[in-house]
Image (cartoon, rainbow, N blue to C red):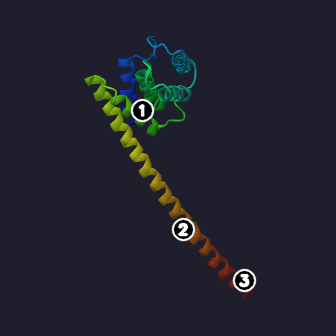
Amino acid sequence: MNKQLIAICTTMLVLTGCGGSTYISNNDPDAKSAIQRADSLARVSTPQSAAAAYADFAEQYPHSCYYKAAVRNAAFFHCDPLNTELDEPAALHWFQVYRDLGISGNERQEVDACIGLLKRNIALRSKMSKKAADLEQQVKYANEEIRKLKDVDVKIHERKTKK
């Protein structure tokens, strides 16, 4: 399933262009500087740094001409397989925002597939977490029972050695 997500995200990057936001039609120098910083981080830094920079940009400059590209890149970098701090809920959020920006049919289908896979991964991780918690409780209970049996065994052994 993660391989499917990676394949779809990679396809999306190729189709939409891996570069960030190279077009310039916004007069806001702060927005231009911020998107250039995010693009630079995407090229030379870690995926988590790029994801954070694009997300910050999208939150600070929602009316910028770079907004759509920043949202797309925030989504991709949050679920990038090289991202050691993979954040599927954040990726899901940014993919949903991107989908609502009026993207084309094929791209929309691919984004919807990413959204579906992310939702499934999040649900599976939640189930696994609950199962792990249940198992921890069972191990804790079993260890307590073993301790009790050990105490009983020690008492029996002590009685036998006293005789």
Across and down, in percent, residue 101 comes to: 34, 27
What's the distance in space between the residues labelled 1 and 2, CA to CA? 42 Å
Q: Earlier in the sequence, mark 1 or mark 3?
A: 1
Pointer 3: residues within 10 angstroms few (<14), some, or many (20+)?
Answer: few
Q: Quadrant of the N terminus?
A: top left
Amino acid found under the numbered disc labelled 3: Thr
CB atoms of marks 2 and 3 within 8 Å:
no
Q: CA distance from mark 1 to mark 3?
A: 70 Å
- The residue shown at (43%, 30%) is 75
Relative to 40, is 52 above or below? below
Amino acid marked by disc 1? Trp
Taking 83 as reference, is 106 left or right?
left
Give the number of the disc on residue 161. 3
Separation (CA) of disc 2 from disc 3: 30 Å
- Which quadrant: the C terminus? bottom right
Left or right of residue 93, residue 146 in this image: right
SS class, disc 2: helix
Q: Nearer the viewer, mark 2 or mark 3?
A: 2
Pointer 2 or 3: first along the chain: 2
Which residue appears at 35% of the width and 35% of the height? Answer: 115
Q: Tag on residue 141?
A: 2
Q: In the rendering, which numbered label is found on residue 17?
A: none
